[in-house]
Image: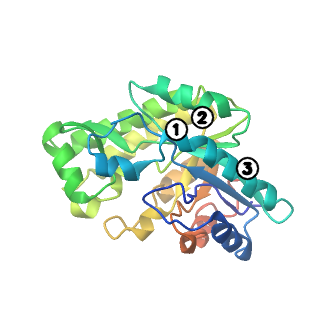
């Protein structure tokens, strides 16, 4: 049977989300019949990783708060034991050329972490590292001239996803590991020059043997449905079907940043996997 599990969620430690306590999220998950709920907060980033102090303050918790988050998540897990399984996790950013920072950050917590979602949110762009998912205007300013075309940005993104898979492959297999919102590059596609669907499909298909060899799952992230510039899941149906055929684990992710988003579009995921995939 399909385990009702929300595997990608955020907390009050996300500074571009809601200050609500996790009890509000978890109580909603229980009311919707979820059996497992993963806390997967953004961990700290290197100092000045994005060279905009105001934006940097919103992207991730400062490093001094990581122990507080881990204690908070452990407390939520303990308090809800017997009602719902709360899993302690992080949504790690893949940091090209700076994975040593991530390795150092994770090292003290590997014995406590149950889930790690590895995502690509940043690419080199105009003026340094830039967010791919801030605003359509920022995306255009950051990347279109830098890479010469939208196709160049798409290739740079999937190159980074391949790097994320290679890095995630080295994480302990005692931790559930998966790649987050693999098609995040599509977040603003309705507000940008058209993306070549054949290019995207070819790049996604090329990820499948890498995911399988690394024993990594995919975050079937439905947040794209909530973005008017996207209107789709970040894992398309054809890719869901290929993952099911290849035995690649699929985990539903609401990517909730406020309590009302918990469980969003679960019914789409349930239909998409045909009551078969992620357990």
**Can you give x and y, in whole percent of width and height, for residue 72 in the image?**
67, 52
Q: What mark, if any, has residue 208 been given in the picture? A: 1
In terms of sequence position, does the residue under pointer 3 or pointer 2 come before the other? Answer: 3
Determine whether, in the image, residue 17 is placed left or right of residue 146.
right
Gap in angstroms between the C-alphas marked 2 and 1: 6 Å
Please indicate, yes or no, whether residue 142 appears anywhere in the rendered image.
yes
Q: What mark, if any, has residue 100 been given in the picture? A: none
- Measured along the vertical axis of the image, is residue 215 above or below residue 58? above
| Residue at left offset 63%, top offset 66% | 270
Determine whether, in the image, residue 191 is placed left or right of residue 85.
left
* For discs 3 and 1, the disc positioned in front in the rendered view: 3
- Residue at disc 3, secondary structure: helix
Mark 3, residues whose alpha carbon is within 10 Å: few (<14), some, or many (≥20)?
some
Residue on which disc 3 sits: 74
- Measured along the vertical axis of the image, is residue 13 above or below residue 118? below
| Residue at left offset 58%, top offset 58% | 9
- Measured along the vertical axis of the image, is residue 168 above or below residue 184? above
Residue on which disc 2 sits: 212
Residue at the extreme right: 82
- Residue at disc 2, secondary structure: helix
**Can you give x and y, in whole percent of width and height, for residue 143 in the image?**
20, 43
Q: In the rendered structure, are the residues bearing label 2 and label 1 in contact, judged by CB atoms less than 8 Å apart?
A: yes
State the residue in front, 186 or 248: 186
Determine whether, in the image, residue 165 is placed left or right of residue 199.
right
Mark 1, residues whose alpha carbon is within 10 Å: few (<14), some, or many (≥20)?
some
State the residue in front, 18 or 202: 18
Mark 2, residues whose alpha carbon is within 10 Å: few (<14), some, or many (≥20)?
some
Quadrant of the frame with the N terminus: bottom right
* For discs 3 and 2, the disc positioned in front in the rendered view: 3
């Amino acid at each position: 049977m399909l385990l009702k599990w929300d595997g990608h969620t955020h907390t009050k430690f996300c500074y571009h989300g809601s200050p609500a306590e996790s009890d509000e999220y978890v109580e909603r998950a229980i009311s919707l019949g979820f059996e497992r709920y993963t806390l997967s907060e953004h961990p700290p980033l290197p100092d000045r990783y994005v060279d905009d102090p105001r934006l940097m303050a919103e992207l991730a918790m400062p490093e001094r708060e990581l122990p507080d988050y881990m204690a908070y998540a452990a407390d939520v897990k303990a308090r809800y034991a017997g009602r719902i399984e709360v899993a302690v996790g992080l949504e790690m950013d893949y940091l090209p050329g700076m994975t040593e920072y991530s390795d150092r950050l994770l090292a003290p917590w590997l014995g406590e972490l149950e889930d790690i979602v590895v995502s690509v949110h940043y690419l080199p762009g105009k003026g340094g590292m830039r967010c791919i998912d801030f605003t359509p205007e920022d995306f255009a300013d950051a990347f279109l001239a830098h890479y010469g075309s939208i196709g160049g940005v798409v290739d740079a993104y999937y190159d980074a996803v391949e790097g994320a898979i290679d890095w995630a492959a080295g994480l302990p297999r005692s931790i559930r590991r998966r790649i987050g919102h693999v098609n995040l590059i599509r977040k603003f596609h309705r507000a940008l020059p058209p993306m070549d669907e054949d290019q995207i499909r070819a790049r996604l298909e090329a990820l499948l043997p890498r995911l399988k060899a690394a024993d990594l799952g995919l975050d079937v992230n439905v947040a794209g449905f909530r973005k008017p510039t996207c209107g789709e899941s970040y894992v398309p149906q054809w890719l869901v079907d290929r993952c099911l055929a290849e035995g690649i684990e699929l985990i539903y992710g609401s990517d909730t940043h406020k309590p009302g988003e918990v469980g969003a579009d679960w019914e789409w995921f349930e239909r998409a996997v045909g009551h078969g995939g992620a357990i």
